[in-house]
């Protein structure tokens, strides 16, 4: 039994034999309850910063989209050396229970054109592609490839306003901090949730991608990016945009150490930033953190006043409630 889909096609479950021949269709996803203004995301292909490597990804447009309007752009790509977070199928038929697919749709519903691109340094391609980030996990899904890709897409779709670009990540990623520090001329707003730092992570998670120490690579960019990942605090002086840090104080997956080192450096550099600490929360960020991240992007990218204390509920809240009741 297998289920297949594309980001712009509904999931279909089929029964196949050992030779791969389809015997019958078992189930087709029911999308009759989708919002009337639902817009399917579009699969896209661009070229990497090297001008020759194909980069694949997805672009979301907000409900009520008009090609004649101008929309801020949100980079939601989540690069990791050992996995992919760029949507491949639709709804829950994709990586990480397809939280990336559903989150991308949610960000688009706020009024953004959302772009997810899988730059060099990620897995599931050839070894040369993945090795781009070897010795520096933070360089996975290279920011230079994503910036180049968004510039190409903006020529294709003039509705994308590249003067208003934000960057947000899933839990444990480094992209928003690296984006604002490495490319302050491009990224204006960033939200980092549970900021990751390989120096303080599990050896089993890092050594296969980081090695045992600094590794000289074949491109100069690698050496510069290595400093960003290992010592983000050294680049605090470069912050120009708006940065929000969110972290659960009981997080046993991503240490708060890297975040606090960055916070101290930002203060020493006299930089303004925002931070939300969740004293009783671990790695899974609850509704409060999600809502505050949405509010931050709406305020600083859309220049709108978000609704106060909006009643939002996520699957994490339902899970915690059921666990509390003994289910």
Image: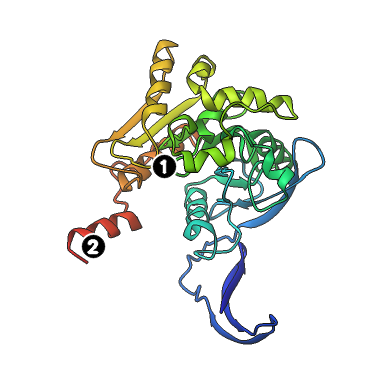
Quadrant, the N terminus: bottom right
Q: Secondary structure at mark 2?
A: helix
Q: Nearer the viewer, residue 64 or 210?
A: 210
Please rate how many residues cluster around mark 2, counting C-alpha atoms within 10 Å: few if below 14, some from 14 to 19, many from 20. few
Q: Residue at x 17, y 62 (%)?
A: 325
Residue, far right:
52
Q: Mark 1 or 2, which is nearer the eye?
A: 2
Image position, residue 178 (x, y; %)? 55, 29
CA distance for labels 1 and 2: 25 Å
Q: Nearer the viewer, residue 281 or 148?
A: 281
In the rendered image, the vertical position of residue 160 relative to residue 177, given as above or below: below
Please rate how many residues cluster around mark 1, counting C-alpha atoms within 10 Å: few if below 14, some from 14 to 19, many from 20. some
Image position, residue 173 (x, y; %)? 49, 39
Residue labelled with disc 1? 294
In the rendered image, the vertical position of residue 69 relative to residue 257, given as above or below: below
Disc number for residue 318: none
């Amino acid at each position: 039994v297998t289920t297949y889909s594309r980001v712009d096609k509904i999931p279909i479950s089929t029964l196949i034999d050992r030779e791969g021949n389809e015997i019958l269709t078992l189930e087709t996803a029911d999308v009759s309850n989708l919002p009337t203004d639902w817009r399917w995301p579009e699969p896209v292909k661009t070229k990497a910063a090297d001008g020759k490597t194909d980069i694949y990804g997805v672009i979301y447009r907000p409900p009520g989209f008009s090609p004649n309007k101008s929309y801020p752009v949100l980079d939601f790509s989540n690069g990791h050396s050992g996995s992919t977070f760029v949507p491949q199928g639709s709804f829950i038929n994709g990586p990480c229970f397809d939280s990336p697919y559903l989150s991308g749709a949610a960000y688009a519903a706020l009024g953004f054109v959302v772009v997810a691109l899988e730059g060099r340094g990620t897995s599931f391609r050839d070894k040369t592609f993945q090795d781009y980030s070897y010795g520096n996990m933070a360089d996975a899904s290279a920011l230079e490839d994503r910036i180049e890709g968004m510039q190409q897409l903006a020529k294709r779709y003039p509705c994308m306003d590249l003067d208003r670009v934000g960057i947000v990540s899933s839990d444990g990623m480094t992209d928003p901090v690296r984006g604002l520090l490495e490319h302050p001329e491009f990224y204006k707003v960033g939200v980092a949730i549970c900021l990751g730092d390989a120096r303080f992570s599990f050896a089993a998670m890092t050594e296969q991608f980081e090695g045992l120490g600094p590794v000289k690579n074949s491109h100069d960019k690698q050496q510069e990016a290595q400093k960003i990942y290992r010592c983000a605090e050294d680049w605090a002086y470069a912050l120009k945009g708006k940065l929000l840090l969110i972290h659960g104080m009981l997080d046993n997956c991503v240490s708060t150490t890297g975040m606090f080192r960055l916070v101290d450096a930002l203060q020493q550099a006299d930089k303004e930033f925002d931070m939300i600490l969740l004293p009783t929360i671990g790695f899974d960020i609850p509704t409060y953190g999600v809502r505050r991240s949405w509010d931050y992007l709406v305020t600083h990218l859309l220049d709108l006043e978000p609704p106060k204390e909006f009643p939002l509920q996520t699957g994490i809240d339902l899970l915690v409630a059921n666990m509390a009741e003994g289910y």
